[in-house]
Amino acid sequence: MPSRDDWPKMPNGYDFDGRHLLTLVRHGSSPFDNEWDVKLLIQEIEGRFLAVVVDIPHVSTGYNNYGFHLKLSNGMDVVARLARGDVNMPGYDGAPIHFQVPEVIFEAAVYVLLQSEPGILASRLLHYRLPVQHEGPKLDRPKDITGRRLLVFQRAVGEARVWECLNPLQKSCLLSRAAHIRASLYKFKVPPKFASAWLLERLFEQQPDFFPIPVAPTREFCVALFTSKIEATIKGNGDMIGCEDDDNTVGPVAAAAKQSLLRLIPRILPEGDDNTDLYRFVLDHGDFGIHNMLVAMDENNQPVVTSLFDWETGRIVPAILSDPLMAVTVDLVVDKDAAPSLSRLPRTVKADVSDEAATWSRQYFKALFLEAPEYERVLRAGGDVRHLWFALQDWSGNNPEKYFGHLGAWAERRLEELGVNQ
């Protein structure tokens, strides 16, 4: 059983085009009937907003969620984001309920937090509901939708996934405007209580049980964060490492790598009195890109971002660990010296396509660093630190001896270059 529904097909065998859903539902021919009942979503929306759903102009799908555009009789235009997976499905193997609930609560808290920040353009959340896991065996497909998380937003003007429709000048304009949003997000001052409440909760696996010192925007805490993360990931020799299902244990190579990494951490985190920008807390979107933006055209036929959504993978990090990535058809990233670069390029890519993507990266980061020049300085200061952090984040759980062996060898080389081993 998959962890999420397949996109439905029509009786003629073609994919549902996402249009005229309300008409199809009224005629008893909803393309979703084999999976779940759309009338239950309509009833929930109508009960929450005390208005009748008069139209569902379009339905879209992402990796984890459906997006339903609904028009209500009271004039409201809303988007209902409903999970494609139900935690009560037989054999459900998606994100478990104890992951989903705090994820939804965190995302809702982010929308509330950013509502007064016009430069970030976070969507306006109107309602959300947590998924509920029913007791007992899961033998049949659920008859309700309570096992699917639901968030409802005020619909902003604009369309999603417009990148391929834009000409080079329009793409440059959109990158500049996206950079302005990213700079605003970087500059946003995360309230200390929000950081304390969510930093550990939103930390990627493997998570420590607690931090040894209070959460604070300091170098001392960043050392503790790194140390706790490595201790939680690579425990003692012979202990389980990664996912329990993988049945891997810490071997001698990974155990030695752990000690090298712990020795390296305090040597690569910058010190000094002028480093307050390095360790202040930043809210990262976690999936910043064109696929999570609505875009409209202004009076000059240039693209304008009207909404930034899907904060479910967001997290709180010290600025030195912030990720400036912008996703288009490839990922626009920086190298260890904060110079524009690319990732997620196809294995076989033509030179002109690669050159065009490199131009996008230069345009985006030029605009970003003009808006937030201190961000560039922070990224440059964190070359080694960021390499280690994202290496920990990118580990898939496979072959820990080989993976951490390479990382430990890198740490030993850096210690040697820094003169620590002499």
Image (cartoon, helix red, strand yellow):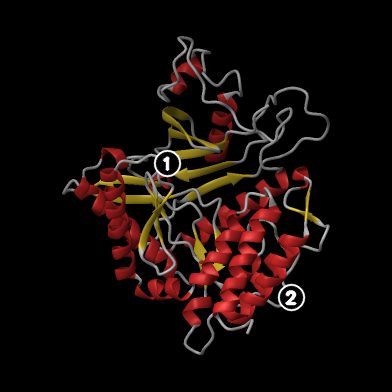
Q: Position of residue 320 (x, y in %)?
A: 50, 72
Residue at the spot 82% in from the left edge and 57% down from the top edge: 239
* Secondary-structure class at tag 1: loop
Q: Quadrant of residue 160?
A: top left
Q: Quadrant of residue 206?
A: bottom right
39 to 66, vertically: above or below: above
Q: Residue furthest left?
A: 300
Q: Quadrant of residue 335?
A: bottom left
Residue at the spot 17% in from the left edge and 48% down from the top edge: 299
Residue at the spot 66% in from the left edge and 53% down from the top edge: 102
Q: Look at the image and tell me whether residue 234 can be seen.
A: no
Disc 1 residue crowd, few under 14, some 14–19, many 20+, Cα 10 Å? few
Question: Where is mark 2, residue-wise?
Answer: 212
State how far apart marks 1 and 2 are (Cα).
43 Å
Q: Nearer the viewer, residue 384 or 138?
A: 384
Q: Position of residue 355 (x, y in %)?
A: 27, 50
Q: Position of residue 267 (x, y in %)?
A: 59, 80
Which of disc 2 and disc 1 is earlier in sequence? 2
Question: Where is mark 1, residue-wise?
Answer: 347
Give yes or no for contact between labels 1 and 2 (Cβ–Cβ under 8 Å).
Answer: no
Relative to 421, is 295 on the left or the right? Answer: left
Residue 390's label in the rendered image is: none
Q: Nearer the viewer, residue 376 or 107?
A: 376
* Secondary-structure class at tag 2: loop
415 to 98, vertically: above or below: below
Q: Quadrant where the C terminus lies? A: bottom right
- Indicate the amino acid at tag 1: Arg
Disc 1 vs disc 2: which is toward the camera? 1
- Indicate the amino acid at tag 2: Pro
